Image (cartoon, grey):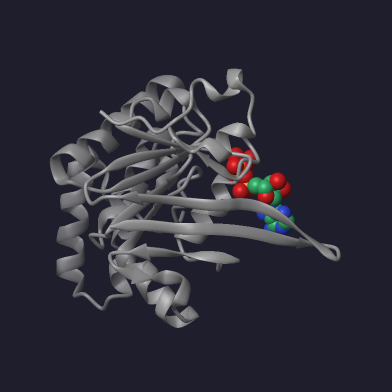
Amino acid sequence: MLEVQQLSHSFPSGTESTQVLSGIDFRVERGEMVALLGSSGSGKSTLLNLMAGLMKPTEGSILIAGRSIDKMSENELAVFRRTHIGFIFQAYELIPHLTVRENVELPLVFQGLRSKVRREKAIELLTRVGLAGKTEMFPSQLSGGQQQRVSIARSLITEPAVVFADEPTGNLDTKTEAEIIDLLIELNENSGITFVIVTHEHEVAKRTKRIIQLRDGYLVEGGAAEALADVTAAEAEPLTEVRP
Ligand SMILES: Nc1ncnc2c1ncn2[C@@H]1O[C@H](COP(=O)(O)OP(=O)(O)OP(=O)(O)O)[C@@H](O)[C@H]1O
C-alpha cells in the first residue's frame, strides 16, 4: 500500500546542506493504522510532505498503491493526490463560505461527478461521522471536534488508498481528542481505511496498533542498531515499532 524505501532528504543551507531524514525504510499495509511519532524537529512534516508528493526526496523512493510517486511529473502527481491520497489537517482547512456538505463534496467536483451523486456520497459520509443533522450548516457553526469530523468525511470521499492525518487532534481538548481518535479507529476497523497519523503525542500514538518513531531524522525501530546508537539508552526505551 505505502512503501518508503531508503528515503533521505536534505535541505540546502548556504553552501552546505542539512540532512533532515536518513535512510528511512518502512511499509504500511492496506487496512493498517499507523502512528508516525516524533518530537518537534524530528522530521515528521518533512516525511509527510514527501509521502504526500508535495516535495521530491533527495534519495530513495515512495510507492503508494504500487506507483512510485517520486518519479511522477507535477501534473501526474496532482491527479494522483486528488484521487489516491486523503488528508486531515490539524486546523481542519475547511472552506468557510461553503456548507459542511459542499466542503465534503469538493474533492469530487474535480472528478466531474454529477451533483446528485456527489450530494448522496457526502451525506452518507457525514452520517457515518456523526453529523447527519449538520449537513447544511457552515463550518463556523460547528465545534472544533465537529469541524474535524467534516474534514475526516472530506478525506474519505474519493475512497483514497491512504489517509494522512497531520496532528489531527492538535487543536482539540482531551475529551474531543479521544472521540476523534475513536472515530478514526472505528473507520479503520470497520471500513478498512488505511491511516498514517502524524503526531508528537504519545497518548495519541499509543491508541494505534503500530507506532513508527522518528528521532533526529532516523527511524527508531527494534533492530535498527545504527539509529539506536545515536540516542541514549534512556531515550531509546519507549521507542520502537509496536505491533499487536
Ligand atoms: N524548508 C526547509 N529548509 C531548511 N530546513 C528545514 C526546512 N523544513 C524543515 N527543515 C528542518 O528540518 C528539520 C525537521 O523539520 P520538520 O518540520 O520535518 O520536523 P517535525 O518533526 O515535523 O517538527 P514539528 O513537530 O515541530 O512540526 C528541522 O530541523 C527543520 O528546521
x then y, percent, for residue 9 = 61, 59
Q: Position of residue 183 (x, y in %)?
A: 26, 34
Nearest the eye: 19 or 161: 19
Specify the quadrant that holds the C terminus: top left
Q: Is residue 36 above or below residue 66?
A: above
Residue 100, compared with residue 181, is above or below; it is: below
Which quadrant does the N terminus fall into? bottom left
**Total marks in image:** 0
Q: Is residue 97 at all visible to an observer of this figure?
A: no
The answer to whether residue 94 of the structure is visible from this angle is yes
Residue lying furthest top: 234
Please name the residue shown 28% across and 64% down the image.
65
- Quadrant housing residue 203: top left
**x and y, in percent, of residue 198 in the image:** 46, 41
The foreground one among 83 and 150 is 83
Closest to the observer, 137 or 26: 26
Compared to 108, does 120 lie above or below?
above
Left-right relation of 195 to 94: left
Residue drawn at the location 44% of the way across and 53% of the way down: 94
Task: Tell me what residue is drawn at x 22 percent, y 56 percent.
Answer: 122
- In this view, the residue in front, 230 or 105, is 230
Q: Indicate the position of residue 185 as horizontal and vertical percent values.
A: 25, 34
Judge from the rendering whether residue 230 lies leftward or rightward of residue 236; answer left or right: right
